[in-house]
Image (cartoon, grey):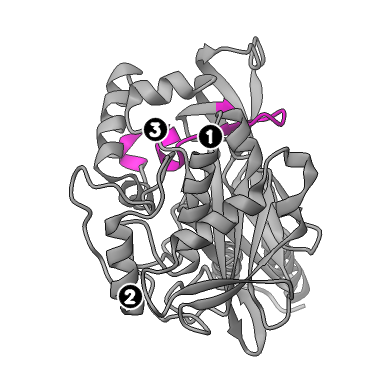
Amino acid sequence: MQRISGFSLLLSGAVLLGSCAQQPLSQTPDTASDPTVIRPLDTWCGGKTGNGTSATYYDASVSSSQWGFDYTSTFDQARAQWSGISSRVALNKTSSTANNPDKYYVGNTSSAGLLGLTTPYIYRNGVLVDGSQNLDDVWEKTNVSIYDNTFQQNGFTATERLGTATHELGHSLKLAHPGQGSCRVTAIPDGTTAVMVQGRKAYGVQQYDKRELKAFWGL
Amino acid sequence: MRRITWFQRGSALLCCGALGFLGLHAHDRTAQTTIPVLQVHGDSIVYATLSELEEAADIIAFVRPVTPFLGREHVNSFYSDGAIQDFYTKSRVDMLKTFKDVNGAVGAARTFEMIEPVGLVEQGSRRLKLQIEGYSETESGKTYLVFLKSNGLGGYSVINMNNGKIISDKTQEIAQDVEEIGIDGLKLRAEARGRYRL
């Protein structure tokens, strides 16, 4: 009978375990169907520091001459779109980055068709972190980006660029896409327009958006 | 030296196998669960019908990703203050059949690099997977019908978010896609499956 020492058994076990532990990253499975993915619910609750009143800071990219377009005016008009609807909502421009204002940016994206993104930030253990994981937390601030190259490539008019900026600022006020909130869900009737609907749009805040804003923040 | 019986040898091998299996699974679970997945909200151009999508796309093709997601190139760009400007993944795919190639970008190439609106991002000490509007990445070894458009920066990316890529095997369509696509998306996908014989 062949003899096997305890050492050789131990060694073969260690080699087997080691080969598993050192499996290269590229051989790990895809995570697209991972059930642990954290997904937002249908509305965004939780409010925002300062409630509906936010200081807003324009990053230098907004006024950059490289765009050949006046995005400062676009964001000014977008802020104005959301004013005068609820007495508790105001997006006030500031020239200071102190106290975590909402920040507006203009950039380029490699994702064709992407118009803008809004990223909320929350405090976790005293550190400001991306809050997209749980949109119902109280947001400390948001970063809003709109993408010039998508506008240019698709021939967007100034009004359509304003539509995108207004949509993103709506997100910064905790408004979700219609029917996709977690705190309040209001189905949008057929034929109704809303700036919070995704896609190319040549209009600003509509009745649906105003109703949602007031329902969330108050009159 | 002490003799080892067949029973002892079998038990030892069984233990090694079990430990190896557990180790492998622990590794997979770690890879999947230690990267939080965040969905970033925004706005994008929506193509509600198949004809709109076909017209907008520069490339329509059956593709099969070569590399698992974590092994792909994940690209981030930042504004001057360090805030993230853009993130995406470059996915190398085998070109199985091309239906539309208006700029000749694919040509006779057997593989192609397409851009997907999802990416891995380092934020502080954390590594995050960011999905734009719930976009789920294509999986290696599976076949998809994809609609790609030039981004004007030298690359071609999936358009229409989850409604710009349709997995060939309908039974493998993940629930996340179905939730995100809505009624128009379901109709678009059904129409595409018929037209492209998926």
Q: Chain of mark 1?
A: A
Cα distance between the residues tagged 1 and 3: 19 Å
Q: Amino acid at mark 1?
A: Thr
Q: Which residues are magenta?
A: B149-172
Q: Secondary structure at mark 2?
A: helix
Residues at marks 3 and 2, common chain?
Answer: no
Q: Residue at x 58, y 58 (%)?
A: A76
Look at discs 1 and 3 and give the one toward the viewer.
Answer: 1
Query: Is A17 on the left or on the right of B132, as rendered?
Result: right
Chain of the residue where label 3 is placed in the rendered structure: B
Nearest to the observer: residue B142 or residue A113: A113
Query: Depth-wise, is mark 2 or mark 1 nearer the camera?
Result: 1
Q: Quadrant of the N terminus of chain A?
A: bottom right
Is residue B157 highlighted in magenta?
Answer: yes
Q: Which residue is under mark 3?
A: B47
- The residue wearing badge 1 is A157
Q: Position of residue A123 (x, y in %)?
A: 60, 84
Going by the image, does A162 lie left or right of B194? right
* Amino acid bearing label 2: Phe
What is the residue that sits farthest to the right in this orientation? B80
Residue at which label 2 appears = A216
Number of residues whose C-alpha sits closer than 10 Å to that of mark 2, classed few (under 14), some (14–19) or many (20 or more) = some
The three-letter code of the residue at mark 3 reads Tyr
Can residue A200 be found in the magenta stretch?
Answer: no
